Image: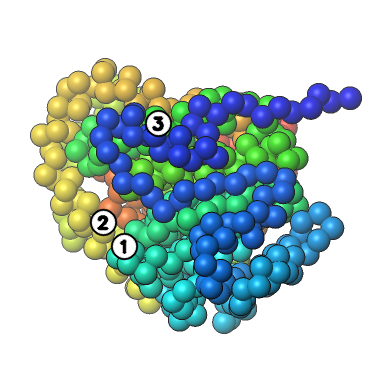
C-alpha cells in the first residue's frame, strides 16, 4: 500500500498572505506597496467560503454580483460547479448575473481587447465581480476591472475562483494580451480574494496540474536568463523575486514527493507554488524572473498555431519542454565562450539586416506582415540598447570565469530537469503533448524566438555572438532527444 503524501512546509506560505507580505517587506528592506490580494483560501471546502467572502468585501449586502465564466462544464465531486456557485451566491439574497464568454469564431478563448471590452461593459458601480475559471478567464476579468478603474478610486471588489492549477495568472499583477497575433504583457491588477478549492482542482483535467507545475518549473533556467541580462546591462536582477521563490526551488525543483501527487495534497501544493510564482512577479513588477527564452519560444508556438491549422497547445507544457532546450543552449554558449568563440566586433548587426531577418522569419506564419511589424519595434529597441552596452559586454567576457559561475548557480543540469518533469508526470516530447507539435514547428519557434520581444535572453546572446546557427540548433535537438530517450526508452521516430 503506497504511503500517504504529506504536504511540505512552505517558508513563504501564500495562504498566510499577510505574513507573506511582512516577510517580503523584511527581505526587501524597503516599504512595499501592498497589492489588492489580502485573502487566500485553500482547502477542500474553500468554495463554500464564498458567502462569507462576499460579506467581508461588502458588509452592507447591497452590492450585486457579476460572475464571469466560459461555457466549459466543470465538476466539484458530484456537483456541477458553476450552477453550485450560482446557487451559493443567490442564497445570500444579492442580485446575481452571469456573463458567459465565448470566442465569436468558436475557437479557444483568447485574452484580447475584444473579450476585455465585453466584460468591462458589464461592470457596474456597487458590484462584486467574480472570475470563475482558469488563467484566461482570470486575465480577462482582472484586466477588465483594471481598465474600468485604473486609479483604484471605484474600488471594484474582485474574487478569483481558481478552477485549475494551470498558470500563475491568479496572483500576477499583470495580464498577457494577444495584440496583432503577438502575446504582450501589460500592467493589470490582482483579485482581492483568491479561492483554491482542492476538490475542484483535483477534478480538473490532469494536464492542467502538470502544465501549471511546468510553467513554474521554468525557474530551473529563467533566473539564469535574468542574471545574464543584468550582467550585460540589458535587464535588472530582482533579489526579492528570487528570495520569495525559495519554496519553488526547494519543493518543486527539489523534487518533493508531493509534486507527483494528483490528489488533494498535491493540488494544494501545486496551487501554492503557482500562487508564489505570481506573487514573485507582482513584487518585482515584471514577468522576467519566471519568463525567459523558454516563454518566448512558447509564445512563438502560440503565434504559429493558426497558420499550422491546430489549436493553441498547453502553455505550461510548452514552456517546460522549451526549458530543456534553453538549458542545452546555455550549456552550448558557456562552452563556446570558454573556447573563446566570440568576436565582439561581429556582435552588432545593422538594423536593416535584422529587419529583413524578422520579416523573413515571421512571413512563414503571417504573410500579412502584421506579426513582423509588431515584433520589429521591440527588437530594434533591444538592439539599440545592446549597442550601448558594448563596454559592459567586453568587461563581462574579461571576467568570464566569475560570470560563468554566477550563471551556473541558476541553471539545473538538463538531465536532472528532464527527470523532474518525468516525476511530475509531464510529457517529455512536444509530439506527446495533448496537442502534438511537429519538430519543424518547434525548431522554427526556438530558433527565431529571440526576434519576438525586447527582453534579452540566452537566445539573444547565442545569436548575436554567432553561436546559434542551423548546425547548433540541430545539435541541441539531438541532445534533447538523447535526454528524453533515456527516460522513455523510445526514439523520436517511434512516436511520430
Task: Point out which mark residue 375 bears.
Answer: 1
Position of 164 relative to 483 (above/below): below
Q: Determine whether the residue tagged by mark 3 lies in a helix, strand or loop.
A: helix
Q: Which quarter of the picture shows residue 268?
A: top right
In three-dimensional space, the C-alpha distance between marks 2 and 1, rounded to whole angstroms, equals: 6 Å
**Residue at image x 30%, y 65%?**
151
- How far from the left and from the top, in percent, is residue 413? 50, 25
First in sequence: mark 3 vs mark 1? 3
Residues 221 and 79: in front is 79
**Residue at image x 52%, y 44%?**
275
Q: The N terminus is located in which quarter?
A: top right
Residues 447 and 29: in front is 29
In the picture, measured across the screen, residue 355 lies left or right of residue 419, that is left
In the picture, measured across the screen, residue 441 lies left or right of residue 358, that is right
Q: Does residue 200 show up?
A: yes
In three-dimensional space, the C-alpha distance between marks 3 and 2, rounded to whole angstroms, equals: 37 Å
Q: Determine whether the residue tagged by mark 2 lies in a helix, strand or loop.
A: helix
Task: Point out which mark residue 379 bears.
Answer: 2
Residue reaching furthest right?
A: 1
Question: Closer to the camera: disc 3 or disc 1?
Answer: 3
Mark 3 and mark 1 residues within 8 Å of each other at the beta carbon: no
First in sequence: mark 3 vs mark 2? 3
In three-dimensional space, the C-alpha distance between marks 3 and 1, rounded to whole angstroms, equals: 39 Å
Amino acid at each position: 500500500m503506497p504511503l500517504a503524501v504529506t504536504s511540505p512546509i512552505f517558508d513563504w506560505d501564500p495562504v498566510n498572505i499577510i505574513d507573506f507580505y511582512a516577510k517580503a517587506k523584511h527581505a526587501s528592506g524597503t516599504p512595499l506597496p501592498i497589492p489588492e490580494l489580502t485573502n487566500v483560501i485553500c482547502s477542500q471546502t474553500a468554495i463554500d467560503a464564498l458567502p462569507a467572502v462576499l460579506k467581508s468585501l461588502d458588509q452592507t449586502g447591497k452590492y450585486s454580483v457579476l460572475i464571469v465564466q466560459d461555457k466549459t462544464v466543470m465538476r466539484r465531486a458530484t456537483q456541477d460547479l458553476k450552477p453550485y456557485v450560482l446557487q451559493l451566491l443567490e442564497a445570500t439574497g444579492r442580485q446575481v448575473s452571469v456573463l458567459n464568454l465565448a470566442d465569436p469564431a468558436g475557437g479557444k478563448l483568447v485574452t484580447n481587447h475584444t473579450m476585455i471590452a465585453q466584460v468591462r461593459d458589464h461592470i457596474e458601480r456597487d458590484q462584486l465581480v467574480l472570475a470563475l475559471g482558469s488563467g484566461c478567464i482570470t486575465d480577462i476579468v482582472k484586466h477588465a476591472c483594471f481598465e474600468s478603474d485604473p486609479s483604484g478610486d471605484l474600488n471594484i471588489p474582485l474574487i478569483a475562483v481558481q478552477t485549475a492549477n494551470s498558470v500563475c495568472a491568479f496572483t500576477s499583477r499583470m495580464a498577457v494580451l494577444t495584440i496583432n497575433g503577438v502575446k504582450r504583457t501589460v500592467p493589470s491588477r490582482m483579485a482581492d480574494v483568491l479561492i483554491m478549492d482542492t476538490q475542484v482542482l483535483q477534478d480538473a483535467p490532469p494536464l492542467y496540474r502538470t502544465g501549471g507545475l511546468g510553467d513554474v518549473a521554468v525557474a530551473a533556467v529563467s533566473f539564469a536568463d535574468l542574471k545574464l541580462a543584468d550582467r550585460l546591462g540589458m535587464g535588472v536582477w530582482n533579489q526579492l523575486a528570487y528570495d520569495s521563490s525559495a519554496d519553488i526551488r526547494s519543493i518543486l525543483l527539489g523534487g518533493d514527493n508531493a509534486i507527483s501527487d494528483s490528489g488533494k495534497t498535491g493540488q494544494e501544493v501545486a496551487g501554492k507554488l503557482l500562487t508564489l510564482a505570481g506573487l514573485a512577479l507582482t513584487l518585482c513588477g515584471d514577468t522576467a524572473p519566471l519568463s525567459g527564452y523558454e516563454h518566448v519560444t512558447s509564445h512563438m508556438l502560440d503565434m504559429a498555431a493558426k497558420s499550422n491549422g491546430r489549436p493553441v497547445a498547453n502553455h505550461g507544457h510548452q514552456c517546460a519542454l522549451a526549458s530543456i532546450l534553453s538549458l542545452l543552449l546555455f550549456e552550448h554558449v558557456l562552452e563556446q565562450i570558454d573556447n573563446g568563440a566570440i568576436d565582439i566586433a561581429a556582435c552588432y548587426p545593422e538594423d536593416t539586416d535584422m529587419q529583413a531577418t524578422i520579416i523573413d522569419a515571421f512571413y512563414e506564419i503571417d504573410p500579412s506582415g502584421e506579426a513582423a511589424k509588431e515584433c520589429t519595434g521591440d527588437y530594434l529597441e533591444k538592439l539599440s540598447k545592446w549597442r550601448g552596452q558594448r563596454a559592459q559586454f567586453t568587461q563581462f567576457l574579461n571576467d568570464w570565469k566569475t560570470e560563468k559561475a554566477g550563471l551556473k548557480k541558476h541553471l539545473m543540469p538538463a538531465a536532472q530537469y528532464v527527470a523532474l518533469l518525468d516525476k511530475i508526470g509531464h510529457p517529455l516530447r512536444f509530439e506527446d503533448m495533448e496537442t502534438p507539435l511537429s519538430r519543424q514547428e518547434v525548431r522554427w519557434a526556438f530558433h527565431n524566438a529571440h526576434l519576438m520581444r525586447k527582453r534579452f535572453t540566452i537566445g539573444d546572446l547565442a545569436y548575436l555572438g554567432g553561436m546559434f546557427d542551423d548546425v547548433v540548433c540541430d545539435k541541441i535537438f539531438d541532445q534533447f532527444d538523447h535526454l528524453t530517450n533515456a527516460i522513455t526508452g523510445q526514439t523520436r521516430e517511434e512516436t511520430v
